[in-house]
Amino acid sequence: MKIIICYIFATLIGAQTALSAFPEKTIPKDKGNGSSYTYVSVGVGIPIPVPNFQVGRREKFDNSAVDVSIGLVTAVIASRIYGNCSYLKYVNEGKYYIGAGGSVEVAVLFCEPFINYGLTPTFCVGKENEKRFHQIRASLISFTPIGIGIYPDIAYQYGFKF
């Protein structure tokens, strides 16, 4: 498992390096929704209203983007910390997007000593404007040390660009 975690972090660092190699002119400057940005988002789980918080960076290229973020989902008895990397494809003149990616997660249950971690594929759809975005992020399965588990997770997120 340590090898997988090291591989994921090396991939994320490699993606960061690869993104910095793109010339500045490939980032669109004339779109109404702006160019690359850093963001903070708050959200709530669906149907169980568990709050979540996320900080990230979205690097845009023509009609696509790479989104890298870290987040916290917390309730009274349990919390989850995750790192996420997604590829987004913009449609309808850059106002809407669909995306897919993956996250590395660590979950802690406070009422008994329990810690779990895993890799989770994620999917999202969203709408973006000049200063904010809305998105729904969903995942169904997680690859953990004890095997593949079904952990459905759907969250609505509202993000602020800066």
Image (tube, rainbow, N blue to C red):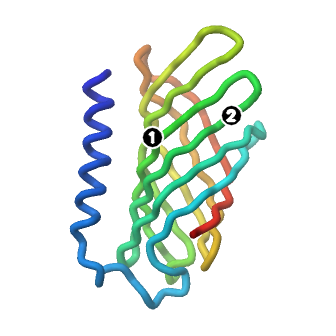
Q: What residue is at 71 percent from the left and 12 percent from the top?
A: 111
Residue at coordinates 54% horizontally, 41% vertically from top-left?
139
Q: Which comes sooner in the sequence, label 2 or label 1?
A: 2
Label 1 Cα crowd, 10 Å radius (few <14 / some 14-19 / many 20+): many
Mark sitting on residue 103: 1
Most foreground residue, 80 or 91: 80
Can you tell which of label 2 and label 1 is closer to the viewer?
2
Question: Residue 154 falls in which quadrant of the image?
Answer: top right
Amino acid carrying label 2: it is Thr
Q: Eyeballing the image, is 159 above or below 154?
A: below
Q: Left of 140 or right of it: where is 104? A: left
The residue sitting at the top extreme is 112
- 90 or 40: which is nearer to us? 40
Q: Is residue 77 left or right of residue 26?
A: right
Of 95 and 43, the residue lying toward us: 43
Q: Position of residue 138 (x, y in %)?
A: 58, 46
Residue 136, how many percent across, how many down? 63, 55
Q: Quadrant of the C terminus?
A: bottom right
SS at circle 1? strand
- Quote the CA–CA distance across marks 2 and 1: 17 Å
Could you say which disc has been placed on residue 74 in the image? Answer: 2
Q: Quadrant of residue 60?
A: bottom left
Q: How many marks?
A: 2
Q: Where residue 44 appears, x then y in whole percent? A: 73, 46
Q: Decide: is 105 above or below 63.
A: above
User: Do the residues bearing badges 2 and 1 touch, measured as CB atoms within 8 Å?
Assistant: no
Q: Farthest bottom residue?
A: 30
Residue 22 versus residue 45 in the image, above or below? below
